[in-house]
Each structure stands twice: as structure tokens, then as C-alpha cells.
Amino acid sequence: MPVIDHKEIKHILISRIDAIGDVVLQLPTCIYLKQLYPDVIISFLGRTYTKPIIDACRAIDHFIDYDELKSLSKKEIATLFKEKNIDVIVHEFPKSQIAEAAKMAGIKIRIGATSKIHHFLNCNKLIKLNRAESNLHEAQQDIYMCGPLGVRHIPTIGTIAHYYKSNFKPVVELPAQFKVLLTNDKFNLIIHAKSGGNGREWDMDNFTELIKRLPEDKFRVFITGSEKEHELFKTWIPQLPASVIDLSGKMDLNQFIAFIYHADGLVASGTGPLHVAAASGIYTLGLFPVSKSINATRWAPLGIKAEHIESNSDDLSNISVDIVKDKIEGWLQ
């Protein structure tokens, strides 16, 4: 595949209009491209609720809100793209509406995967990639999609993990009412027990046993989750030690990112906050099934202190409390 002359590229748009974890794993592509083209503008087309993630990445220059565009006609979206003088669009999350608008706008380089038929009609650079069947990690797949832009090799998982180190930082200060809860004399551990239906979940009884077995003189435990999950936790929280702090439903995403960034560690299944923790450089433990397309091969957290445990079944039932407890206590050494 011929590589484009970099002198022709002044503005790249990455289109990724899905969930938090997907967006976190998309950031290394932006960082990689910024290293490749330091003077190029990199914009990110994403959902409103993922904007705090995108804002936290210093490699991204502009955010374009898909939720403000989706009700527009394709012609209106094309006009907006023209006004922004976009040279390249990479369709990381395929959306025919956006692909058609990008073609109408006359964007010179339009990259899409061959797994979507509409890309054959609307893209002029096609990448042979079926994400569900690939053995590459999601973050590697994202970079692979940028082959026509001069990406000559796919970085290793370890290399990608280090991309976040100096390129991911929350844009808001952690509010005082949350900052005061973090302690210097104990390990501040976040337990994010639910996944919003996006992955397999460890049984709540396992989390209960884990929390009760962690020594209170060494760990301060925080429970996090959405407002909806906060309602689910009302019968669970009373079963936990009184020292456990329930923060579920109490922070917006900007605050939550900042809280994760300043904590010491997080345990979760394959969900967005897991990837935020890994990108933040804190100790991170992900729990995964072996099932293809939702396993650790594709979705393991990437960070300088991130690790994972993978079950040998379609659920997480055979990941024992002992295994998880040993991993967490190992963080104290």
C-alpha cells in the first residue's frame, strides 16, 4: 500500500464514537500519530460523555462532538468537515453516516476497514481487518488502521503501555471533598464491581469476601459505579466493613478520572474505568473470561502498572478470591 506524502497531511480526524474503554485504547493511536507528525492537527470525533477522556490526552488538539452532529443531514456534516479542512479521516468505529459525509466533503484520505461494505463505497484506503477475528490487542488494531499514514510497524503492548505515561492526565482538579478521602498511610484501592453490561462480571459475593479479607490497616477501599449501580449497591454496601467508602453515583466523569488518577489501585472486569486506571499509571487488575473478542488478548488494560487475570471459561467464576487478593497485596511490596 503506497504511503501518503506527509507534506499533504495537516489535519487528521480520528472517528471513534463508542464507549469509554474503547476511547481510552484509541488514545495511543493519537499519540503515535503525533510522534509521527508533530505539527499535524489531530481531531477526535467522539460521544459527548467520552469528552473528558479525550480532553485528558495531550496528543489530541480538538474534540468534535458526534452527538451534536448525528441529527444533521450528511450534507450538513460534510459542510462542517469542509470548514475544518480535514485531510485524513480514520474510521476506527464504522458509521456509514460519517463515512458518506466524509466522502461528500472531499476529504482526500479516507481510511476504513474491509469488514464494512459501506467502506468500499466511501473510503479510498481500505485496511483488511476484522476486529473480532484479529489476534492483535484493540489498541494495536487501532494503530494498524493507520497504515497508509506511514505506520510501518505495530508497537508492542509494552511500548503502547508507556505511551500514556506523559500523555494522559485529567484536565480538572480533584474536588476537595473527594481528595480529602484519599489517605497517605494506606493503599487507596478502588473496587469497580459492575461493568454496565459491557463485560463479564465477578460475583458480588467474591468482592464482598475480598474486601473483608483485605487488612484495614493497610487498605482504604472505595466502591465506585454509576448512579444506576448505586441503587443496586444499596443492599450490598451494608454487608461490607464500615470503613469502606461508597462513592458510586457521586462523581461525574471528569471527577472520576481525577479520583482514579490520584488513587493507588483499581480492580474491575473489562470496563471503562479499568482502562482509565491503566492509562493513569496506577496499579490496575482486570478480570477477564477466555471468550474470544472479550478476552484479555484483545482488551487487557495497558499501563505501566497494569495486569490481568484470565479465567479458563466463559465467565469469571473460577477466578478465586485468593488469586485476586494475592495480586493486590503484592502491590504493597
Image (tube, rainbow, N blue to C red):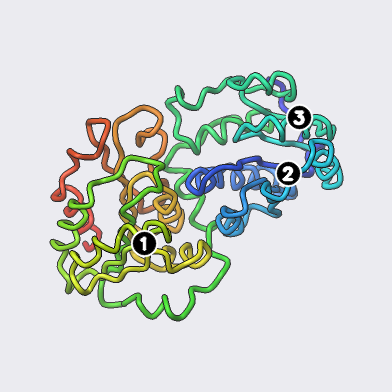
| Residue with the mark numbered 3 | 100
* 15 vs 6, nearest the viewer: 15
* Disc with the residue nearer the chain's start (3 vs 1): 3
- Viewer-side residue, 304 vs 290: 290
Q: Which of marks 1 and 2 is nearer the N terminus?
A: 2
Q: Distance between the residues labelled 1 and 2?
A: 32 Å
Q: Are there few (<14), some (14-19), or many (20+) residues within 10 Å of tag 1?
A: some
Q: Tell me if label 1 and label 2 are in contact, CB under 8 Å.
A: no
Question: Which residue corresponds to the image point at 34% horizontal and 56% vertical from the top-left?
Answer: 192
Q: Is 256 situated above or below 69?
A: below
Q: Residues within 10 Å of mark 3 (few under 14, many from 20)?
A: some
The Cα–Cα distance between marks 3 and 1, rounded to whole angstroms, is 41 Å
Amino acid type, label 1: His
Which residue position is annotated with label 2? 71
Q: Earlier in the sequence, mark 2 or mark 3?
A: 2
Whether residue 248 sits left or right of residue 324 in the image: it is: right
Looking at the rendered structure, the kind of residue marked 2 is Ser
Amino acid, disc 3:
Glu
Q: Position of residue 332 (x, y in %)?
A: 23, 63
Q: Residue at x 78, y 39 (%)?
A: 9
Residue 261: name its quadrant. Answer: bottom left
**Quarter of the C terminus within the rendering:** bottom left
Residue 57 is situated, as x and y percent measured from the top left of the image, at 58, 56
Relative to 326, is 54 on the left or the right? right
Q: Residues within 10 Å of mark 2 (few under 14, many from 20)?
A: few
- Mark 1, secondary structure of its residue: helix
- The residue tagged 1 is 230
Q: Residue at x 20, y 50 (%)?
A: 324
Image spot of residue 191 (x, y percent): 30, 59
Q: Residue 98 carries which label?
A: none
